[in-house]
């Protein structure tokens, strides 16, 4: 029998146990989470300079700088969560940030492409600590609707990274070499390390039950709600990956925006930030399930309608931009609530839960999103059809998970 924790009691005193001011807590958690996204997006403008500096003659090798980081991230997500369940949140978090800082320094001073690739894998592996353990920390302190509200507020800050990071990377290249990009990552990491070390105490309760990795895995995969919403989140994350992988082809290629592409991309991303703000205001009044289920249903309807329009011919740029913005506004009210619903029943193994949910959604989302992106044919049709199919699969998964209790409950 798995140890049980009184989550209701934990919910009642979560605000009392918050170890630092709310605004500071949100900012620190957002910094730790966004380190992984920053490490990907800030690199994009520097790839040609890296090729020249390190004598990379085969341009097909350059994407390894991104993909090997993602590989390290995928492996790391399965490592840091269980470690934090066993040894507490603080020590593994600080260790992960220290390793990330070391990897950034190695990358900045690399004299060969192979050393750079090795450093990038280590960066991804260590960077997973911030992403996974910060989620576990939030679950230690909050649950239910409060956790959904906090995660939405964190996501508002987190979403700004893919909007601003490429421009930041380009600015760094204008004034220095590609090595400065890694030095910026080093400074950001050391800021998070010092801030966490000085201000963030241990959040895992001293009397929390101890789990082996196997027991925690069985608890997470054996909890119907957690497993169901994890699977549904994987389908929805595939929508985001498909959009990121297709956006340049759609806006710069199909619609001929050229250098204006970043403005279209950033405009759609702003809809996610607006959704996070709206969700943080509504979730405590409406409930996670009713809000996320309603948003998912609307996402399915909107994406299916847009796909139907695209079947008759390429829609106008205004229709595509507006439609995608609406889709991602709804998307933003789905994923953060799904994560909170999935994490709620397994707070006693929050590290393993965050690891499994993060690793699964990253892997299945990348697979499904890549498949959809590869269907591009000078039109947003494939992307919009993929959105509708993935949303249908997610809604069906939620319906099966909820069983007789049904959808749209005010919880």
Image: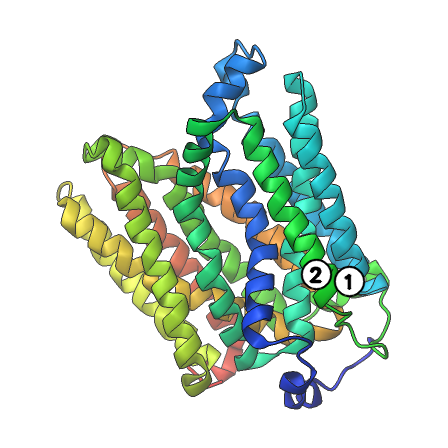
Q: Where is residue 261 in the image (x, y as percent from the top left)?
A: 27, 38
Q: Does 124 sit left or right of 375 as displayed?
A: right
Distance CA(mark 2)–CA(mark 1): 8 Å
Write down the quadrant of residue 204 in the picture: bottom right
Q: Does 372 sit left or right of 203 as displayed?
A: left
Element at label 1: helix
Write down the quadrant of residue 297 in the picture: bottom left
Against 268, is 185 above or below?
above
Mark identifier at residue 196: 2
Q: Where is residue 212 in the image (x, y as percent from the top left)?
A: 86, 62
Q: Can residue 246 be seen in this view?
A: yes
Q: Which of 341 and 25 is in front in this view?
A: 25
> Residue drawn at (70%, 53%), measured in percent from left and top?
193
Q: Does 408 sit left or right of 383 as displayed?
A: right
Element at label 2: helix
> Does the residue at mark 2 contact the one at mark 1 (Cβ under 8 Å)?
yes
Q: Mark 1 points at which residue?
A: 90
Mark identifier at residue 137: none
Q: 10 Å neighbourhood of mark 1: few (<14), some, or many (≥20)?
A: some
> Residue drawn at (45%, 56%), measured in percent from left and top?
236
Against 368, is 88 above or below?
below
> Residue drawn at (42%, 87%), measured in percent from left and top?
285
Quadrant of image for the N terminus = bottom right
Sooner in the amino-acid sequence: mark 2 or mark 1: 1
Q: Position of residue 27 (x, y in %)?
A: 55, 64
Against 333, is 205 above or below?
below
């Amino acid at each position: 029998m798995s140890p049980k924790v009184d989550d209701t009691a934990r919910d009642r005193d979560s605000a009392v146990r918050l170890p630092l001011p709310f605004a500071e807590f949100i900012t620190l958690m957002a910094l730790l989470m966004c380190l992984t996204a920053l490490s990907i997006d800030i690199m994009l403008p520097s790839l040609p300079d890296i090729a020249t500096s390190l004598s990379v003659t085969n341009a097909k090798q350059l994407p390894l700088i991104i993909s090997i980081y993602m590989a390290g991230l995928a492996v790391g997500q399965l490592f840091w969560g269980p470690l934090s369940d066993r040894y507490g949140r603080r020590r593994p978090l600080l260790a992960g940030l220290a390793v990330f800082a070391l990897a950034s320094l190695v990358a900045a001073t690399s004299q060969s492409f192979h050393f750079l690739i090795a450093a990038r894998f280590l960066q991804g592996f260590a960077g997973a600590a911030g992403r996974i353990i910060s989620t576990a920390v939030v679950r230690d302190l909050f649950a239910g609707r409060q956790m959904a509200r906090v995660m939405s507020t964190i996501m508002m800050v987190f979403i700004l990274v893919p909007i601003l990071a490429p421009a930041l990377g380009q600015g760094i290249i204008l004034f220095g070499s590609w090595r400065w990009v890694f030095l910026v990552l080093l400074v950001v990491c050391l800021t998070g390390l010092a801030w966490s070390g000085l201000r963030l105490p241990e959040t895992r309760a001293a009397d929390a039950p101890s789990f082996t990795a196997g027991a925690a895995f069985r608890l997470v995969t054996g909890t119907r709600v957690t497993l169901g919403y994890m699977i549904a989140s994987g389908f929805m994350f595939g929508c985001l990956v498909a959009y990121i992988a297709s956006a340049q082809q759609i806006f710069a290629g199909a619609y001929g925006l050229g250098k204006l592409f970043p403005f279209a991309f950033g405009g759609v991303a702003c809809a996610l930030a607006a959704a996070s703000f709206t969700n943080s205001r509504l979730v405590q009044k409406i409930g996670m399930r009713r809000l996320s289920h309603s948003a998912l249903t609307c996402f399915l309807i909107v994406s299916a309608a847009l796909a139907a329009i695209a079947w008759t011919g390429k829609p106008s740029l205004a229709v595509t931009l507006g439609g995608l913005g609406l889709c991602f506004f709804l998307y933003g009210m789905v994923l953060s609530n799904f994560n909170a619903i999935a994490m709620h029943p397994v707070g006693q193994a929050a590290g393993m839960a965050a690891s499994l949910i993060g690793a699964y959604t990253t892997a299945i989302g990348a697979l499904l999103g890549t498949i959809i992106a590869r269907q591009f044919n000078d039109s947003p049709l494939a992307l919009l059809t993929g959105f509708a199919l993935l949303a249908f699969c997610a809604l069906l998964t939620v319906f099966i998970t909820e069983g007789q209790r049904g959808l749209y409950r005010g919880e």
